[in-house]
Image (cartoon, grey):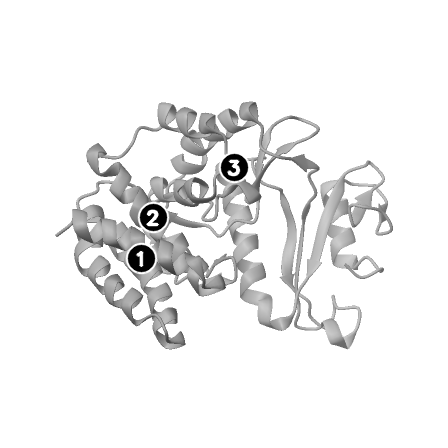
Amino acid sequence: MPPTVHSVFVQAIQKEEPGVTVSASSSPPIQSSSGQGYIGKIGSTSQIEQFIGEAESLRAINIAAPGLAPKLLAAGVFDEETAENDGETGKPYFLCEYKDMGTLTDSAAKVLGKRLATELHGYKSTMGFGFHVPTFCGATRQANGWFDTWEQCFDALIGGLFDTLKKRGGYETLCKQGDGVRKRVIPALLGPLIIQPVLLHGDLWSGNTGTDTKTGQPVIFDPSSYYGHNEADLAIARIFGGIPKSFFKTYHECLPKSDPEDQYELRGDLYELYHYLNHTVLFGGSYASSARRKMDRLLKAIP
């Protein structure tokens, strides 16, 4: 955040808090005279899609589950009128409220499980499966768009990862397995589902959750949202741990597992595979081995 507070940020904050003054000399980076903090970010021209994707994700989440994620105040691209110098013209900006957070506590995890099941995953799309803008899971641009079925949507998402790995080279065996998963496993596990497209966070691991230190309520952030099968939102949380078991227990008390229930674990493996593949794209290394093990199990279970 540059030392000068941009007028567009000040105007957005004063619209939220009429009559307040705004300072950029404190931590968090922008603070109003009422004590509320705000986070302002300015990116490079190459990050425009990422900024838009995060902004649109937060907008959707705060409609579906108000207060569960930081409130977005302003987002866009600086033009000649709003930029403070020529070097900022064409760069994306983003402003949201700041929340002082600690790790996700057991009690906050229970609340998160209930709110995710009843609010976020109760918010349905009228356009189908997918999202209206690209969103980014980490640095990976997700192949969003609109699809009539979840099978088509998920196949496009995971297919984008395999395409990236094929172009990169060195993952021939992994991608050959992937062809089998796309031809056999995805149609078998996702085709029979009778589900509604609901809003997902998209990257719901422990590092993107927390507890508001002022209220004790759960907070989720850094989303890469799209509309899909609710169970897909639980996958990365299982991979990396850190989210209390009470979250999963409360979640499924409020929203039972989809039918056929006996395929829940296999669907979980498929959704976890997406994140193992994404981490292979981002980091390589042992994640490729984890992806292969997931595909071995799935291909064995679905002959």
In the rendered view, would you say 74 is above or below 49?
A: above
Are discs 1 and 3 less than 8 Å apart at CB? no
Q: Residue at x 34, y 48 (%)?
A: 271
> x, y percentage for residue 13?
75, 47
Q: Relative to 79, is 190 on the left or the right?
A: left
**Which three-letter amino acid code belongs to the residue tagged 3?**
Gly
**Which three-letter amino acid code belongs to the residue tagged 2?**
Tyr
Residue underneath mark 3: 242
Q: Relative to 301, is 295 on the left or the right?
A: right
Quick one: SS at disc 3?
A: loop
Quick one: SS at disc 2?
A: helix
The tag on residue 292 is 1
**Mark positioned earlier in the residue sequence (1 or 2):** 2
Instruction: Report whether residue 176 is seen.
Output: yes
Q: CA distance from mark 1 to mark 3?
A: 24 Å
**Mark positioned earlier in the residue sequence (3 or 2):** 3
Q: Residue at x 51, y 40 (%)?
A: 63
> x, y percentage for residue 55?
57, 53
**Which three-letter amino acid code belongs to the residue tagged 1?**
Arg
Residue underneath mark 2: 271
In which quarter of the view is residue 233 placed? top left
- Give whichever of 116, 67 is nearer the camera: 116
Quick one: SS at disc 1?
A: helix
